[in-house]
Image: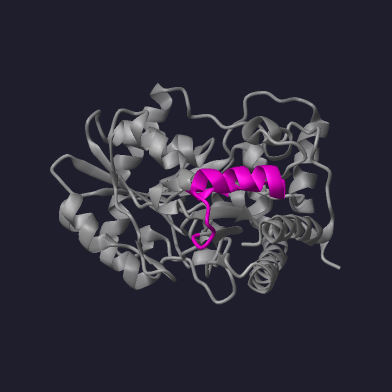
Amino acid sequence: MSRFNEVVERRGTNSLKWDMTKQRFGGEDLLPMWVADMDFRAPKEVLDALHNVVEHGIFGYPAHSESVDEAVQSWLNRRYNWSIDTNSLIYTAGIVPTISYIIQAFTKPGDQVIIQTPVYYPFYDVVKKNNRELLRNPLSFDGDRYEMDLQHLESIITEKTKLLVLCHPHNPVGRVWKREELEALAALCEKHGLLVVSDEIHADLLFEGQTHIPFASVNSDAAQRTFTCLAPSKTFNLAGIQTSYVVVENKQYHKQLNNHLANTFANMTNSFAEVATEAAYNHGEEWLSELMSYVEDNYKFVKQFVNEHMPKLRVMDSEGTYLLWLDCSKLPLTSTERKKWLIEEAKLALNPGAIFGEEGQDFERINLACPRATLQEGLERLKDAYTKRAF
């Protein structure tokens, strides 16, 4: 029996996902299947390492440990065949804040930043709230598969365009970008002198047969223009610990970002971050392998259930992440009507696709990282609401 079948009560734990659902969605008795955290306990080795910190009982200012660098370096080498110098690492307290700091340090107000939509919704705010101009490069979608539209991308670049934010693997569409796609993008960024912030937080969450290729590893030029943002937080369900890091192989950029973090007093992590990172990367591989087998089984279960019981809905093909992209375009409902139907009739809290951009209007995002019993309850609720409407 899988350890991931355990249903852990999260209500009353200050959980955004479980305790803030009513406030966020407005309905009663909703099953939360929205925000991207898991309903699974972190690996025992991580919990044991954190217990040791708690039992010591003193939470003074933490110093950096080189053993964390070695754990990160080993993980990147084992998982992605990517060899980095530990001197290229900078530790931060979350990937979205890190993207914001990079935008602040390497662009100026009025400069243009590109995102590839539909995409993780904080990308919009992290550009706009820093007073940079947002350029949208929508993914090409043929009804079955998403691709990068590099022809459109090149057409929107101007002399003010300084930076591209890459979502890799892509949230919410579940694409794991292939080498030839990354090489083509890298050539275009080199041609136009674009810096690249590559958000690779979902890199470890791949389905069987998929391989993650860090954008910075594509060639030497990409290595020098890329800020690779990574974290154990999504992989091992440690988001609340706020631990992340960025790989900056360009020495000048590394110094410039470090100086910006120091100037904004954002250059210190908490007492738990490095401890959790080191334990996860040194001891979490078996747990991760079991996790992704479980998540992929959940994905297949949903796909079969939807095909059998709700033929006007369609589960999009996915290559990774624990987030499912559900095509609702055949329902006779607008995005707003569909959200109301899901809340009031299905009693489900899902991420409406529209928040990821106008290209997501016909979709919903569902979190698969939950015990099968929770997932089945959500599907039964959806089926009942679907059947009563006689879609």
What's the magenta region? 329-353
Please tell me whether residue 294 belongs to the stretch shown in magenta: no
Q: How is the image coloured?
A: one colour
Please tell me whether residue 351 belongs to the stretch shown in magenta: yes
- Given residues 38 and 89, the one toward you in this image is 38
Q: Quadrant of the C terminus?
A: bottom right
Q: Is any atom of residue 149 visible in this view?
A: yes
From the top left corner, tell me how far across and down residue 311 is, in percent.
Answer: 61, 70
- Given residues 375 and 327, the one toward you in this image is 327
In the image, taking residue 339 as reference, residue 173 lies left or right, namely: left
- Given residues 384 and 85, the one toward you in this image is 384
In the image, taking residue 231 as reference, residue 147 lies left or right, namely: left
In the image, taking residue 1 as reference, residue 138 lies left or right, namely: left
- Residue pictured at 13% horizontal, 42% vertical: 159
- Residue pictured at 24% horizontal, 39% vertical: 112
- Residue pictured at 65% horizontal, 67% vertical: 310
